[in-house]
Amino acid sequence: MFETLKEKNPRWLFMSVVGSRNYGTATPESDTDVKVAYLPTFNEFYSGKFKHVDSSGPDQDLDFTVHPVHEFLRHAFKGNMNFWEVFFSDSIELNFGLDVLNDEFLMNARNAVSLNYTANFNAMRGMSYQKWKGITKHVNDPARWWKDAQHTVRMLDTILLYGETSDLYLDVNSVDDTEWFDWKGRDILTSDDIAYVVQLVAEKIQKVDSFEEAFENVHFEKSFARRVHMANCESLVKRLIKKEMSQEFMSR
């Protein structure tokens, strides 16, 4: 699956499957989402114009987005789950030249993200709350309602597991209570269903909110270690950038 993307993006540094196929919640109808980070060229850095690709569309079986690596890391280290989930996908492939560099980058990236407690907490909680607030619009569309309910509860369970273990687990198999796994695809919605899920979500939100102060405290305690891991990732990328720019400059 990645071979075509590698051919189209020869300067790729890492890529992985994201979304439902990464979480283990995909259905046979689900498309495959992939994120790609690439090393910009000398001309791109000089001009400040970088390549951004978004192939998503209703007729696409494979949706992929391409981002320059420095922008990718900036989003990931600010707590944007749409970016940092790449580092916690079993499908990730890296292209830093040597296996030891691939391993070093991935270890530092995972640690930098995992220690970003407040940003991750706020981002994941915001995503789950936003999805839940919008669910009332889809009462007349049971399939969409159940899908959004599943997304909300899965995200809340991810936060709770993060609070309990300090590790980020995105795969559905990491969560003990997965009754919501089969919600996606349901096409019948009753008042009892709504009442049950509303109560379930309310209980999980209450538990999630109770973690907020703890997340803030540990975020402060781990700030130095987090910055070290971020700097190590950025250092590896900067070395590649300097090498590429030097080679490009010498060839002129």
Image (tube, helix red, strand yellow):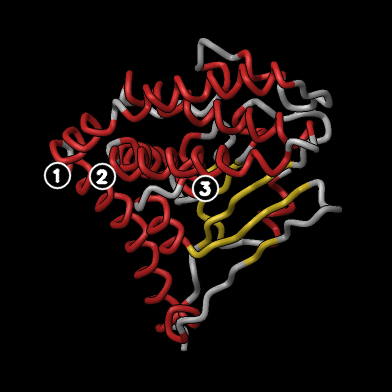
Between 81 and 67, the residue placed more toward the observer is: 81
User: Which structural element holds mark 3?
Assistant: helix
Residue 47 image point, x, y percent? 47, 86
Between 246 and 192, the residue placed more toward the observer is: 192
Find residue 82 and name its label. Answer: 3
Q: Residue at x 17, y 37 (%)?
A: 222
* Mark toward the start of the polypeptide (3 vs 2): 3
Disc 3 residue type (three-letter)? Asn
Query: Is 18 left, or right, of 204 in this rendering?
Result: right
Q: Residue at x 63, y 19 (%)?
A: 180
* Mark toward the start of the polypeptide (1 vs 2): 1
Q: Residue at x 76, y 21 (%)?
A: 190
Query: Is 57 left, or right, of 15 in this rendering?
Result: right
Q: Residue at x 61, y 16 (%)?
A: 196
Residue 10 image point, x, y percent? 62, 61
Disc 2 residue type (three-letter)? His
Mark pair 1, 2: CA separation: 9 Å
Mark pair 3, 2: CA separation: 20 Å
Question: Which residue in the protein does label 2 denote?
Answer: 229
User: Which structural element holds mark 2?
Assistant: helix
Question: Which residue in the protein does label 1 denote?
Answer: 224
Residue 125 image point, x, y percent? 42, 38
Disc 1 residue type (three-letter)? Phe
Residue 228 image point, x, y percent? 20, 47
Relative to 62, is 37 above or below? below
* Mark toward the start of the polypeptide (1 vs 3): 3
